[in-house]
Image (cartoon, rainbow, N blue to C red):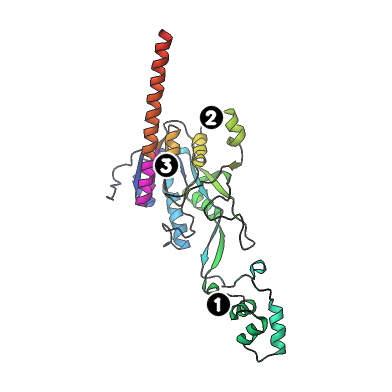
Amino acid sequence: MALIDISKKLEPNNIYCGDSRVLLKGIEAESISLSVWSPPYHVGKNYEKDLTFAEWKALLREVIHSHFPVIKSGGFLVINIADILCFKDDSMPRIMAENISRRKVDLSREEIIRIMKKYPDWNRHKLASHFNCSEQTIDRRLNGNNVRGGKYQYQTRVCLVGGFIEEAASEAGFYLYDRRIWLKDAAWENSKWHTISYRSVDESEYIYIFWKPGITKVDRARLTKEEWINWGSRGVWEISSVRSNSDHDSKFPVELPRRAIRLFTDPGEIVLDCFVGSGTSAVAALSEDRQCIGIDKESTSVEIARKAVESLSGRKKESVQMELMIRDIEAVYNVG
């Protein structure tokens, strides 16, 4: 795909392929009313697998900083992210959990030690024969590892990112305005509603809302009375997860950006998504009669997003044509 000349400003209602840290510099200053996006989560997806945790944090920090010149005074930066990240960390001790409930052989470490004291010259092979189990089982019970591979695997690091996101935004000049909780469900692929450790199945994510200093127009008329009651002034947004990720493995529901767009922008204003992925935010913006700019470094994602936008545009065009036809029929009927 051809390189984009950032000396020419990025035009609204387009999806661009490239690095957000570069392309954000090509957006007109103070032109974006709302930037709403969900970054890579650093959980080993193909598009982020080559980034270390430090590099991932540097990416987000630079992207957040690059937003400050392009967002209007009084405008908003909205970031959706899972506050708890889990990823493999080679600096952690490689100790296997003693998962009692998953044992196929009912044998404790204490039992093995008792026999070892009684027969101090017995090796692992004799111990295994005595207990009628495998040598690997003896090793697991005694040493807390898995000789078939577990002891060679990195442990899982659990890390909170909310503080880092706020710090990066504050450095850029933004102020934390609000935080919403997206209460979803465990409907993602391969979810079993349980884990094999004490860690929970994460059924929520956070929506961090940052404000650029300036006059912000508060207009409750942007929402219906029911919308204000149900989610506009509520700290928890209950929105079901995307049920199928057949064309893109990191989708979020269109309702999520749609709510932010309805709350913080007026029709005609420009909404930005610098990690546009499958184009969800762009579709939400256009559906609500806003303009959009989408950016993604993955060419496959850009094509998916462009097709989504084109499909929406086609449906909207058909809808307008149908509405005009109905009006014509009504006019004829009224005349008659």
Q: Secondary structure at mark 2?
A: loop
Above/below status of 297 relative to 96: above
Identify which residue is drawn at 61% across, 35% down. 230
Please state which of residues 234 and 118 is positioned toward the viewer in this rendering: 118
Neighbours of disc 2 within 10 Å: few (<14), some (14-19), many (20+): few
Residue stretch rendered in magenta on the structure:
292-308
Please state which of residues 176 and 191 is positioned toward the viewer in this rendering: 191
Label count reads 3
Above/below status of 195 relative to 135: above
302 falls in the magenta region: yes
Q: Which residue is mark 3?
A: 272
- How much space separates mark 2 and mark 1, taking CA atoms? 62 Å
Q: Which residue is mark 2?
A: 219
Q: Which residue is mark 1?
A: 147
Q: Left or right of 310: which side holds 158?
A: right
* Residue type indicated by callout 2: Asp
